[in-house]
Amino acid sequence: EAEVAQSPRYKITEKSQAVAFWCDPISGHATLYWYRQILGQGPELLVQFQDESVVDDSQLPKDRFSAERLKGVDSTLKIQPAELGDSAMYLCASSGQVEVTDTQYFGPGTRLTVL
Amino acid sequence: AQSVAQPEDQVNVAEGNPLTVKCTYSVSGNPYLFWYVQYPNRGLQFLLKYITGDNLVKGSYGFEAEFNKSQTSFHLKKPSALVSDSALYFCAVRDKGGANNLFFGTGTRLTVIP
């Protein structure tokens, strides 16, 4: 069964450092999402891609966060500089289409701890 | 605006008993509703979704959910709980006329007691 891949699974960093997360969606999936899940809460969307284009980044803190999907396949989410409040699980999801009825499939996530 | 409420942070049920995890939603248009399960330090696994049609939706691992438009609810159910069902469950909604992203509830932790 095809899965969304993410790495690393865990990342510990000090505040003010730069961190990067990688996501490889299910093969053939055109739509890719990055979510942030703070402990005790549901995931919240950070950015959505359709192929290589950003569809929605209204919730992405652009002063420190950036995301790219250069070839429309895998994607990288970067935080620079990291802050204590960025400690969370970062989830990547993909779906075959951008239709609202389409199911999003999630990767295992990257748990970030900022010290 | 779209939102989901999961009124119970924690649900405990004995193994073999039926379980229900509650979810209510608020959307301006027609809702598309989803249930996901999350095991410790793992991503979310899709269980089932309601798009249109039959109000009773069957999903993975023996779970089902009932869409009730008048009560704006989409409760998750299973006739006989297993210890392995213990996990965190999230309800999510999309609005037909709204954004494409999912809006999640805060989650309900299900504990099945042997």
Image (spheres, rainbow, N blue to C red):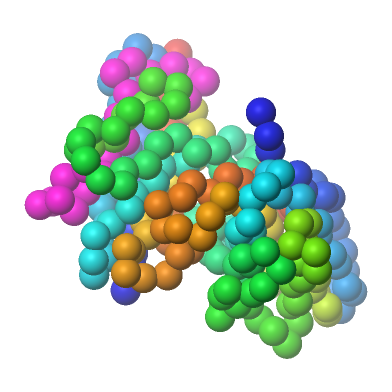
Q: Which residue lies at the image location 52% right of the left edge and 20% below the top edge?
A: B84
Residue B109 is left or right of residue A76, and the answer is: left
Range drawn in magenta: B67-85
Residue B6 against residue A1 in the figure, above or below: below
Residue B51 against residue B15 in the figure, above or below: below
Q: Is residue B72 covered in magenta?
A: yes
Q: Nearer the viewer, residue B51 or B114?
A: B51
Q: Which residue lies at the image location 46% right of the left edge and 50% below the top edge?
A: A102
Quadrant of the image containing the C terminus of chain B: top left
Q: Quadrant of residue B108?
A: top left
Residue B75 is left or right of residue A93, and the answer is: left
Give the percent coordinates (x, y) of residue B41. Answer: 67, 41
Q: Nearer the viewer, residue A24 or B17?
A: A24
Q: Nearer the viewer, residue A104 or B4?
A: A104
Give the percent coordinates (x, y) of residue A53. Answer: 67, 73
Q: Which residue lies at the image location 85% right of the left edge and 58% below the top edge?
A: A12
How many marks do you count on the picture? Answer: 0
Q: Which residue lies at the image location 59% right of the left edge and 35% below the top edge?
A: B39
Q: Quadrant of residue B54?
A: top left
Residue A77 is left or right of residue A3, and the answer is: right
